[in-house]
Amino acid sequence: MTARVLVVDDVLHNVKLLEAKLRSEYFDVLTAMNGIDALEIIEKDQPDIILLDVMMPGMDGFEVCRHVKSNPSTEHIPIIMVTALDQPKDRVMGLEAGADDFLTKPIQDLPLFARVKSLVRLKFLMDELRIRNSTGKAFSDEAGLENSSNIKFDDAKVLLVEDYDRVAKRIIGYLENTVDTIDLDDVSTGSLSTENLGDYDLFVISLSLKEADGLRLSSSIRSNELTRHTPILVIIDEGDNNILIQAMDLGVTDYVTRPIDGNELVARVKSQIRHKRFADYLRGKMKKNMEMAVTDAVTNLYNRHFLDTHLDNIFSAENEKQSHASLLMLDIDHFKIVNDTYGHASGDEVLEEFSKRISSNIRSIDLAARYGGEEFVVVMPETDAEFALFVAERLRRTISNEPFIISGSEEPIKIEVSIGVSIMSDECNTKEKLLSEADKGLYKAKETGRNKVCGISCFDE
């Protein structure tokens, strides 16, 4: 995963050290040595994440953070406060100013990389939701919530997973004036016994459980469709970096260390719930906009009009991630025979099932659309050629390996698909070229036998 990181510190040695660490992990690094310069760079270059020193002359890090988070065009950029201060009150000040995390000097590599990668993943997801929301606005004049600062905490619901009774009571005491509902699961059976997990805004999980593995519980929550987008805050022991890295790799979104500071915990809980509710709002808004004539009636996928607008947004000057996107163009082989043999109603059943198989085999940030007739397009942000070809081949196997059941035939019928793949590049840098290159790959797949995937490598053969 690549990203643009802005490092802000008034000490040149600190800037160079962080720059070297981040470049070793292949991040693109920008630097600034005071708050004024940092705000100019943020406004102009829109970094993906900011590492911000607190103690700077003139405008300190807290003030810079408040400026960034109060600006609708930059408030979505995650900020990690970096300082030599290690008092809980300092972390709370940073979080209340809008920071997403707080690291203390000297910065250890593993927590730094884990946090940066976790927050970058969150930002990429939020960026994609914003792009889709702006696409939907092209079909609606309705105004909406533009940032997360106005999110309300009404009926906020948290599940605490802790089997040490005294600690559980203390945590509940910290949070009882912040959220309406705090349920406790002591995992006495070795697993979660709480029902309706999809109703919660946040999971707070101890990683020192006696009868259960907190990491395994976190993994289970993250892999569940109902809780996939729900933030997870874990409680770990100070200095337990290996556990922290594992937790972040599993998709945990935040952490607090023991001994727990109540004010810091409250600030982190509020931050996570705010992010979650804003993402839920964007998803809900996107869904509502889709209902306004942007979906295909047969397949329930996006229609071509929406696809065109979405591609326009991806290639807009405001979106800097277009260079990492790819596109798949799929065409059902010999579909005319299905219509001629079984009728158009059965053909529609095939299209509907075909669309379901596409949707169930792509990521939540990918976009699938019916391009026309039996032709479909999948747009995948943040992908390279290798991953795009992998997904295309998985889709091909998913379609061809399991016959389709239709009402017009007593026996299931075999359906196959040809797929063309294109990758954005310096040469393939418009939506027209991206579609054209995928169409060339599709034609090549058809020409060389059908039921196959053809991308850039096909034209080198």
Image: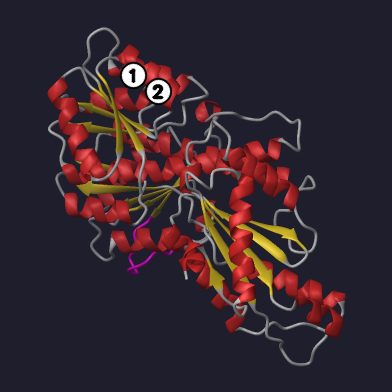
Residue most toward the bottom? 410
Q: Nearer the viewer, residue 291 or 162?
A: 291
Residue 170 is left or right of residue 178, and the answer is left
The amino acid sitting under disc 2 is Ile
How many residues crowd mark 2 within 10 Å: few (<14), some (14–19), many (20+)?
many
Q: Position of residue 164 (x, y in %)?
A: 25, 54
The amino acid sitting under disc 1 is Ala
Q: Residue at x 16, y 35 (%)?
A: 107
Do the CB atoms of the residues marked 2 and 1 lie less than 8 Å apart? yes
Q: Nearer the viewer, residue 68 or 336?
A: 336
- What residue is pinned by disc 2? 42
- Dominant SS type (magenta): loop
Residue 111 image-quadrant placement: top left
Magenta stretch, residue numbers: 185-194
Residue most toward the top? 58
How many residues crowd mark 1 within 10 Å: few (<14), some (14–19), many (20+)?
many
Q: Position of residue 305 (x, y in %)?
A: 75, 47
Compared with 315, 148 (above or below) is above
- What residue is pinned by disc 1? 38
Residue 157 is left or right of residue 111, and the answer is right
Q: Position of residue 161 (x, y in %)?
A: 35, 54
Q: Nearer the viewer, residue 379 or 452?
A: 452
SS at badge 2: helix
- Do we see residue 281 in this rendering? no
Residue 122 image-quadrant placement: top left
Residue 187: within the magenta? yes
